[in-house]
Image (spheres, rainbow, N blue to C red):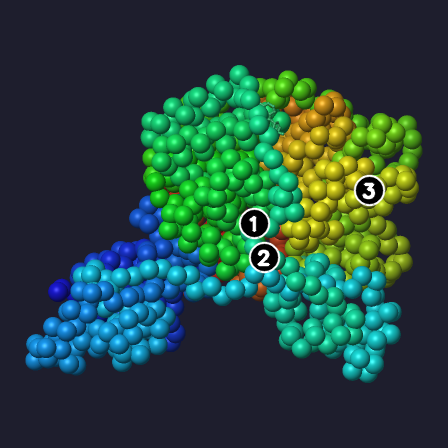
Amino acid sequence: MSPRYCEVALPVPLRSTFTYAVPESFDGEPLVGRRVVVPFGKRAMVGVALAECDSVPDAARIKALTEVIDSLPALPPKLIELGHWISRYYLAPIGETFRAMLPPEIELREDRTYTITDSGHEYFRKLTAAPEIAGAESPEFALLKYFSEHESSTSARLHRRPHALPAAAGEALAEKFVRRGYLTASEVLRSRKTRTQKIVAWRQGTTTASAGGSAGILGGRSFSSAKTAARSAGALAPEARIREVLTAERGPLPLNILLERARVSRSVVQRLEKAGLLQTWEEPIAPGEDPWDTDFIPPANVLNAEQKVALEDIWRWIVASKFSTALLHGVTGSGKTEIYLGAIEAALSRGKTAIVLVPEIALTLWVSRLVRARFGDRIAVLHSALPDIERAREWWRVRRGDASVVVGTRSAVFAPLENLGLLIVDEEQESSYKQEEVPRYNGRDTAVYRARLEGAVALLGSATPSLETFHNARAGKYNLLTLTSRVQNRPLADVRIIDLREEFRRHHRAAPISESLRSAIALRLEEKTQAMVLINRRGYSWSLLCRGCGAVVQCQNCSIALTYHKSRQRLECHYCGFSLRPLKQCPKCRAEYMYFVGDGAERVDEYLREQFPHARVARLDRDTVRTKREYQQVLGAFAKGEIDILVGTQMVAKGHDFGRVTLVGVVAADLALGRPDFRAAERTFQLLTQVAGRAGRGEFAGEVLVETYYPEHYAIQYAAQQDYVSFFEKEVQFRRALHYPPFTALASVLMRDRAVENAIRWSRSLAACFGSFEKQGVKVLGPAAAPLARLRREYRFQFLLKSQRRAALGKALALALDFCAAKEIPATAVIVDVDPASLF
Ligand code: ADP
Ligand code: ZN
């Protein structure tokens, strides 16, 4: 046999793969797509084999891989191709790209059980009869001897080397025997049964005062003084850290996550639980768990004419088995989900598989139960909030072909389905499809590319498509399917713009919501229908301002104002988690005129309770709901009519279908317009249209009130008219004139470091390198301080690269990264973001 080598992608921030020699014990075993264990520096690392070759330069210095993990290659060939594309297109380190595509490494690997067959026994008898040929020392003999004595064994047991062979060799040889028919193999999942997890919560009402009461149990110190003492010492005591994590930062958390975040040991938690400060309970972690699932009867809808026409086209494309992309542009409430289900049916009927991507975890529940109700159990759900063990289980079910439909969030675009016929991307414009860490891919664009690789249909659905997608549809690159009306011809909600300047002139009051909105809500309470209020800012006040010097209290680590949270009595940074007690005195000028500016969801919630003391008010934002369960509880109660007014951040805007909502109020609708981002108008239009779509979905007509200081802004005007096409026409003019997507390929390059000198020096030297790209048709802007000039203690400088030719842009970025590597600028200091979702 000639020597074998393989290319392995390892999870390190480097843009190359590594070559390893393949030991002879793996002869006859294909390695491509399988995870392998290799020596890397002083340690062992898990990577994935991407290719094999039989010669390499400098073979003597090449190390050998030590283990092959999966018996079934984790990645089928098409996914390997997809990974290469992502790594190239997004300039992402190849190993980190592939790690994002692989199942969680919990080594819930399928344990193989091997059993000796009759012909295995016979062969062993032959070997014992002729020991001079077999060689009693040979590995073959040793392994067969072991099986003849034990009948069967698992791969895990083989790893423990009961037969005196090297761990990997035993398994490799067993596989060889399977191919020769001396052994049979079957898969068993080694189930580490953790079906429930322990959730820990800080007991409500145990503030510092009551905690002080249990000082005796807390080792003689009162809690509050322990805390202050620890503060001044620069580090918090374990108890204080737990409290910090469970109250200031988040809500109830699974025990293991709490231990990690608060950096405490289990015994501290047990002690506090005994002391009555912590409360714990067990929660199931099965993905199927869903309190609404029990009495779920899927709606039996008869498709209307528009839906039928759209679906007929989709059937044709799927039957044709050729790559194509379609945009399903349907107004809110036009019944797009019904079309998705029909499309899945088309794919399944041709023996193909399908992936459905949704923009957030909560929606996986809605969609997966519809799919399950219609097509049965051959469905898998994949998203990042599943515990690793569950996710791995689902992942391998898919890989083995036990599921034909996968519903999931962004990363489900990598679901290892074979024979893929359809990829659906619901709400394709959502920025949650963009991963904001390496690899910085966009799940929607990756879905389209994967469809191309697999000869499948990509179906992008939205009421408010991204400019890029609609532009592609207009240009004929994508097919366009349109649903112009709501199902059963329900009217779209009436949208009324409330000019806040006018309001102020009339009422001379600065209340958190306008008088018009307040009286509209009062009317709904009388009518006994429901109202939703969207305020896209968490907390009580946006910032704390000194009226003496005009300074805003900023985060210690980030260039951002701290948000005031009243219930917790903290000023908090929403980026890094830093927090402070509210200040009475300006830290800069010592004046005592601190003033809270801007009302957030918490304040609006409080105001509504004051105004309507008899109404049932609930709030939905990351401060009030922290778990999937709490989220479902609030929405479930709202759906059942147990809540009159639901206040919340954009969480309330998405997807859901409530029949009794007749009023939607949008407070501070123009918040996003002030952002220094070329997508500000697009995002505002999308959010307003989405939330307007929540009203009037049932038998009652709906009304939407939009509060703004810029009533003339086209994003607000067209959202009020729910006129997507006019908005598109207008916005696209700006994009063309200012050279932004979809007319220009755009990338952002960020240089960051804790030392501002480094960040500046590196940016300057990169600027010199970029200088040479202008001639190749790549326009470079910057370096300039990034809009968020400091984040988590790092100073940030930004370049924007624009080009009419994507290939030129990609080449420039690759050269820039080579340049940084040559200048020994740390790889982690440079962030390349191709097709950024936001420049902020
Ligand atoms: P969209 O995603 O386009 O906003 P949905 O798919 O959520 O809309 O559908 C809105 C509602 O209309 C759902 O309750 C759905 O069951 C219902 N629906 C869909 N198609 C029909 C139809 N042909 N006739 C009646 N109701 C329908
Ligand atoms: Zn911060």
Q: How many residues crowd mark 1 within 10 Å: few (<14), some (14–19), many (20+)? A: few
Q: Is residue 70 above or below residue 525?
A: below
Which residue is pictured at 82% across the width and 83% down the height? Answer: 220
Q: Nearer the viewer, residue 524 or 494?
A: 524
Left or right: 116 as drawn, with respect to 834: left
* Distance Cα–Cα, label 2 vs label 3: 30 Å
Q: Residue 55 appears at what percent x and percent y? A: 17, 62
Which residue is pictured at 34% across the width and 40% down the height? Answer: 419
| Mark linked to residue 285 | 2
Q: How many residues crowd mark 3 within 10 Å: few (<14), some (14–19), many (20+)? A: many
Left or right: 178 as drawn, with respect to 719: left
Q: Is residue 753 above or below residue 806?
A: below
Q: Residue 612 appears at what percent x and percent y? A: 89, 39
Q: Indicate the secondary structure of the residue bearing disc 3.
A: strand
Q: Residue 414 appears at what percent x and percent y? A: 42, 47
C-beta proximity under 8 Å, tags 3 and 1: no
Residue at image mark 3: 617
Can residue 233 be seen? yes
The residue type indicated by label 3 comes to: Val
The residue type indicated by label 1 comes to: Gly
The residue type indicated by label 2 comes to: Ile
Q: Indicate the secondary structure of the residue bearing disc 1.
A: loop
Which residue is pictured at 78% across the width and 69% down the height? Answer: 277
